[in-house]
Image (cartoon, grey):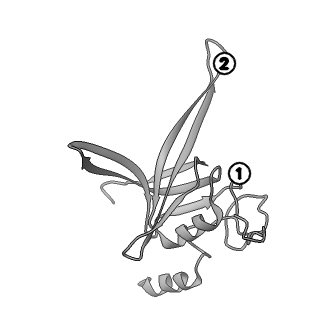
Amino acid sequence: MAGSLNKVTLIGNLGADPDIKNLNSGNSVANFSLATSESWKDKNTGEKKEVTQWHRCVVWNDGLIGVIEKYVKKGSKVYVEGELQTRTWEKDGVTHYATEVVLTGFDAKLILLGDGGGGARPDQNGNTDRPGNKGGGYGAQSGGAARNGEGSNQSSSRQLDDEIPF
């Protein structure tokens, strides 16, 4: 049995379009902020209250980055699974900290849960390469989303098969 577990599961909406960068090493990284909200009715006043938490998400999985690039934008409702990591750096003598939800490797998951203002971006002719997804869920066939980059790159699934030891 494992001595510890670092796993984060969130469902929320993107606060802005994802920022995708191609690094000099040839790798890509996607960054986005995810908002999760909780609402309740105040017992004393009967007034509806709401609090929103913002989570910084960093994606290092090429398959998921491809899905994010095509289908995710500001307002998209997504399910993410990753792990918490805290980075530290010093600038002008001040130590800064950032705690992020990191999606990397085979454990990372990103599932689109409907448009929520997001969805496929039209090409130059105004066409999208994604059929409508009224039922939510995921699957490369419906174009609704991907899990662990499934369906986003056929050759990557072949690579996965080659690495399985049984």
For the N terminus, give its image quadrant: bottom left
Residue 163 is left or right of residue 34, and the answer is: left
Q: Identify the residue under disc 2.
A: 47
Label of residue 117 in the image: 1
* Residue nearest the observer in this picture, 42 or 131: 131
Residue at left 36%, top 47%? Answer: 98
Residue lying farthest to the top in this orientation: 44
**What percent of the width, then of the height, locates residue 10?**
53, 49
**What percent of the width, then of the height, locates residue 123?**
72, 70
**Callout 1–callout 2 Cβ contact below 8 Å:** no
Residue at left 68%, top 55%? Answer: 118
The kind of residue tagged 2 is: Glu
Badge 1 element:
loop
Task: Relative to 162, say whether 8 is above or below.
Answer: above
**What percent of the width, then of the height, locates residue 121?**
70, 64
**What percent of the width, then of the height, locates residue 64?**
54, 68
Residue at left 42%, top 73%? Answer: 27
Badge 2 element:
loop
The quadrant holding residue 163 is: bottom left
